[in-house]
Image (spheres, helix red, strand yellow):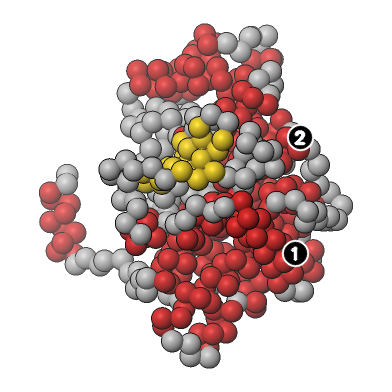
Amino acid sequence: MNDAVIYCTSIISSYHVFSILTSSLLIHSLNKNFHIQITNQLNTPQVLPTYSGKAGDGEPLLESLIWLLLTSEVPTKEQVDTLTAELHQRASKLPSHVIPLINSLPKDMHPMTQFSIGLNAAQTGSEFAKAYANGVPKNEYHKYALEDILNVFAIIPEIAAQIYRNVYFDGVVTKDQSLDYSGNFCRMLGYDDPSFDELMRLYLCIHTDHEGGNASAHTTHLVGSTLSDPYLSYAAGLNALAGPLHGLANQEVLRWIQALQAKFEAEGKEVNAETITEFAWETLNAKKVIPGYGHAVLRKTDPRYSCQREFGLKHMPDDPLFKIVETIYSVMPGILTEHGKVANPYPNVDSHSGVLLWHYGFTQYQYYTVLFGVSRAVGGLCQLYWDRALGLPLERPKSHTPEWLETFAKNNP
Ligand code: MLT
């Protein structure tokens, strides 16, 4: 993740508490060592080394990020190792009925639907729900919420892996708890390539969250504000993530790039800046969008795109799909700026992730959003921990009268 910056701010509430952050949390990699840099308006950095499987030269561990988001403190290597061991141990908290339930689901049910069902079913293990039923005082909610949150982090890789192995393979899930969270997840999915482990470490870190206003983290916060426990709250977040305008977008970008590749091949055209430019204008003139470009809030290249690009340059510079993504990136911001219809002509996170996964033979793109969902749990649920610790209230939208609507319509023709 050299020189890459990732916005990761769903935990804005926590950083308000610690007065560290008012705008964004930046994860920053400098030279060979990965760092997390938190900047506030005064631009005061905090630097967090993370402890990758590859000493000093690798991708960050998700455990380090969890630690930071829950404590606002930079973990030591020992603390990270302790958290890894703790999460492995908590994996046994997966209720025994969940895997048989997943095994009974139709194989053609979308993997995200299965994921949501699996997490909802695991809710029988909620310590928060039990404590609430037993009348625990309000100022102790956060302790039980934290138990659930750590348990959810611990059990979701197995739920996700079981779905993958059932839908596409033999249903067999094999763990290796001598590895970190991401490495073990890769083994459960059936991948045994250290380079793919590195991609998974990067992938799980960068998709955790950014700027908390996204639909899945916000849904988790909204549902959690009713004092639904973390299992139910994040299952709701997963349902939001399953939408085509949200997490499902990554599979659509990959399909678009592959369709472009096939079309050029069929027409005997080379993929280069000129042919892509021509194709982009055809697409835009037909009033279609360029998938993977633009973002609701970002106004520059999504830093998560840049991290993935750097990973691609390091691990697969000659991969044909990676080269297409690079060529698109070299011309598209200019084309979209000239077109003038979009607020942000730069690529977002979804623009790159599918191509990297495809390189390692992870070709089941219908499943990609489940990987996103394993990661987003960390952003959404760390935020939920702070919601409970701060005693944040039930969220409710404002209502308006018909008179207000009339005035609004008149003033906004
Ligand atoms: C995300 O990370 O959830 C996406 O960038 C979408 C968003 O932020 O709205």
Tally the marks: 2
Residue at x-position 47% and y-position 67%: 385
Q: What is the x, y in percent for residue 198?
A: 68, 38
For disc 1, the marked residue is 102
Label 2 amino acid?
Answer: Gly
User: Quick one: SS at disc 2?
Assistant: loop
How far is mark 1 from mark 2, CA to CA? 24 Å
Quick one: 399 or 379, which is closer to the camera? 379
Kindly identify the residue that appears in the image at 60 percent across and 20 percent down: 324
Q: In the depicted view, which residue is nearer to us: 39 or 144?
A: 39
Amino acid type at mark 1: Ile
In which quadrant will I find the N terminus? Answer: top right
Mark 2 CB near ligand 1 (8 Å cut) = no
Q: Residue 207, image x and y in percent?
A: 54, 46
Q: From this viewpoint, is residue 107 visible?
A: no
Residue 59 vs 369, above or below: the answer is above
x and y percentages locating residue 344 in the rendered image: 37, 31
Across and down, in percent, residue 174 comes to: 83, 55
Is residue 369 rendered to the left or right of residue 364? left
Q: Callout 1 environment at 10 Å: few (<14), some (14 to 19), or many (20+)?
A: many
Q: Which is more toward the observer, 338 or 156?
A: 156
